[in-house]
Image: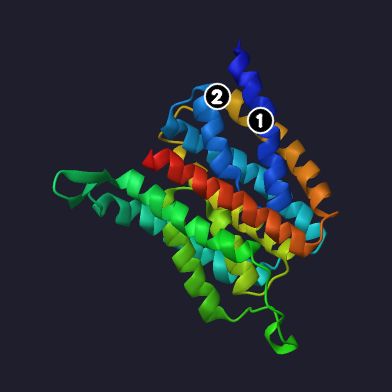
Amino acid sequence: MHDIHFYIGLILALFIGVTLGLIGSGGSILTVPILVYVVGIDPLIATAYSLFIVGSTSAVGSVRNTLDKNVNFKIVLLFGIPSLLAVFFTRSQLLPLLPDAFTLSNNVSISKSKLIMIIFAIVMFAASSKMIKKPRQKNLSTNQIVTSATPLITQGLLIGTVSGLVGAGGGFLIIPVLVFFANLPMKQAIGTSLTIIAIQCLIGFTGDLSQHDIDWTIVLSFSAISIIGLFIGNRLSKRIIDGSLRKIFGWFILVMSLYILFKELL
């Protein structure tokens, strides 16, 4: 029998799905705090649960967007697979090499996790300002969707490395890259991002199965409510034009970046 905190968490899970359906990201950033601070789950286990909840919700969103022809599968392959490999390499090989704390000056040090989150927030802040700012008018020649291999693979490796370092937030970084470097319309960027996130999260979750005892009641109930929220968010996104959707995304990650900075520095 679960207590009141579990049911409050379930209500909040609806907003996880709405966020994923509306702007194609924000799942992990919302899921982990809800599981930790509301439901009372250990942060390490909450991260594993988040992978399944966000991954399953994103997978449903991917199918929905595929039916609406809003997923560019060439970009999923050229960007998503290098990103996935970079996430795996960063978490398995690079992170263990970093020291637990960095010394900034005499008697002043900062932990590895805190430094990573501060860097992540700064990257989010920079991405948000670009999404909020009104884009300059493009020539027709520069408005083509970019599907050439080299830039997409390079960007995928960079984003995967950053995502691997912070352990969350892939969509916050994927969507600006797809919009500004691949020239995807916002709604196609959301559909393509959801597909990449689904692959990353569900593969990541399989690696956690052997390390944690999974409470499937929590995982499946949160996933079900989140999927309901996804359909609500998806329906809302169809009523919003691309430019407005891009600004909503920008303001959302701006608020989240300031929240992370506030939490880490104060």
Mark 2 Cα shell of 10 Å, populated few (<14), some (14-19), many (≥20):
some
Viewer-proximal residue among 185 and 212? 185
Question: Which quadrant is home to the N terminus?
Answer: top right
Q: In this view, does 75 lie to the left or right of 231?
A: left
Disc 1 marks a residue whose amino acid type is Leu
**Residue 91 spot, x, y in % from top left:** 37, 52
Task: Residue at 76% x, 59% y: name it.
Answer: 244
Q: Which colour scheme is used?
A: rainbow
Judged from this view, the residue extending furthest toward the bottom is 141
Q: In this view, does 203 lie to the left or right of 112?
A: right
Pick whichever of labels 1 and 2 is earlier in the sequence. Answer: 1
Q: Residue beneath label 1, please?
A: 12
Residue 203 appearing in the image:
no
**Residue 66 spot, x, y in % from top left:** 77, 59
Task: Residue at 60% x, 58% y: name it.
Answer: 196
Question: Which quadrant is home to the C terminus?
Answer: top left
Viewer-proximal residue among 240 and 235? 240
Task: Residue at 66% x, 55% y: name it.
Answer: 249
Spatial CA span between label 1 and label 2: 9 Å
Q: Is residue 220 above or below residue 159?
A: above
Q: Residue beneath label 2, please?
A: 38
Which mark is on residue 125?
A: none
Task: Residue at 47% x, 59% y: name it.
Answer: 123
Mark 1 Cα shell of 10 Å, populated few (<14), some (14-19), many (≥20):
many
**Residue 153 spot, x, y in % from top left:** 51, 73
- The image quadrant of residue 212 is top left
Judged from this view, the residue extending furthest toward the top is 1
Residue 263 appearing in the image:
yes
Could you tell me if the residues under marks 1 and 2 are in contact, i.e. CB atoms within 8 Å?
A: yes
